[in-house]
Amino acid sequence: MFSAVVALLLTGTQKPQAKPPTLDALVKKTLPRPEEEKWLKVPWRTHLMRARQEAVKAGKPIFLWIMVGNPQGCT
Amino acid sequence: MKNEFIPVTGNTQELQFRPSPSQKWFTAAMNRDENATHKKQMASSMDPQGMYILGPDGKNYGFTNDHYPEDIQKFINTCLAKYKADPPKPVTITAEELNSSFSKQPPKGAAVVRVYARIWPLPEHCWGLNHGVGRDFLWLYPEELMYLATVKADANGVVKMPAALSQRLLRFHLLDDVRGTPDMWRPSEIRKHAFNARLIADANGERTIKFYGKFDLKTGSGGRGFVGTIQGEIGVKGNSELAHFKAYADGKAWGRGTYTPFPPDGKYGLHIGFVDAHDEASQVVPPEAVSTANNDMDYHNPFVSGDRFRGGVTKRPKKQTARK
């Protein structure tokens, strides 16, 4: 009887276990925040030769940004 | 930037080493640069990465590899003034140039997934780049999608993950690229791994497979590693079309790579998210491992030697000397 009461009391004081985060919630935590993607607001072209043609037509220079890994997708 | 320029991004590996009209044109334009910083950078590392302002005729108005906004603004102003004072000559871009390939694109029928990496919790006083986001793309090949769309599950719903996909995740995507171009794992550095997958839904031509994996990745010396787990869900429809892909990996990482110095001290939390991608960039920017090698041979079949992925650059195999 005593042990049953103790067990009941202990159960009553236990905090409910938090649900584990969903896969969607975990993935979301890794995604870039808007302030981390400001540079993607620039309408970067993805083909240098077509950008050349566009530059001829628009009478504008080409701004070419190259990295080891395309800045639009790789670190 | 939007109004005064035609902005373009590119990959040095492709513009330096992959023969194409873009590579030929860029190399000639780059070599016209009189900029001392560019000459010094090329002399020390043969690395042309940075920002260029070019005329469509190949005239080079300037170069910088400075990432401070004020300096870039000055650079832009100076180059624009040069462009206006000395505009490009008329030039015709040929059909061959326009139709040429600029980058290694995903194979027909492949699906593309974005990969993001973050470090948390961030230790106090760690280097600034540790606060950033690592970015890459994962390719799923058509035969892998076809397999997932048709594989038969056992009575408990258990299916086998495509081996090449598991190996590709392990070698090329479960790594710390938060501070820059990472060293990819060699097959021998996959010390332990186990992937389990289960078919959880199969109706109306669409099926969902959940997977779970454990991994233990370490260099030979143990100086760099990542030990953790991955969980994910792949949805496929029809014969081989990706409906969705989402996955999350986390664990403890440690150590620096060739081009990823100053990680947090000791072991730190590394978290990697995967989500299917459908934007334009995902169709023209290949995974880091593909652009590093300038082909997808090892990426497609990731069971071969990983020596080509050391140091972020393509290394030629040593010449074999015949035994006498």
Image (tube, coloured by chain):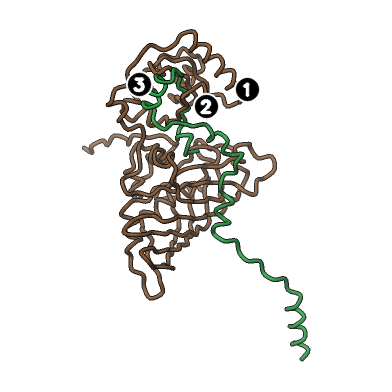
Disc 3 to disc 2, how far (Cα)?
23 Å
Give amino acid for label 3.
Answer: Trp
Q: Name the spot of residue B98 as percent of width and height, x first.
A: 32, 27
The C terminus of chain B - image quarter: top left
Give amino acid for label 1.
Answer: Glu
Mark 3 — residue? B25
Mark 2 — residue? B2
Q: Name the spot of residue B216 as percent of width and height, x first.
A: 49, 55
Give amino acid for label 2.
Answer: Lys
Chain with colour brown in the figure: B
- Whether discs 3 and 2 lie on one chain: the answer is yes
The colour applied to the residues of chain A in this rendering is green
Task: Identify the chain of the residue marked 1, using the numbered disc in the image.
Answer: B
Mark 2 crowd level (few <14, some 14–19, many ≥20, 10 Å Cα) = few
Mark 3 crowd level (few <14, some 14–19, many ≥20, 10 Å Cα) = some
User: Residue farthest to the bottom?
Assistant: A1
Mark 1 — residue? B70
B202 lies left or right of A32: left
Pointer 3 or 2: first along the chain:
2
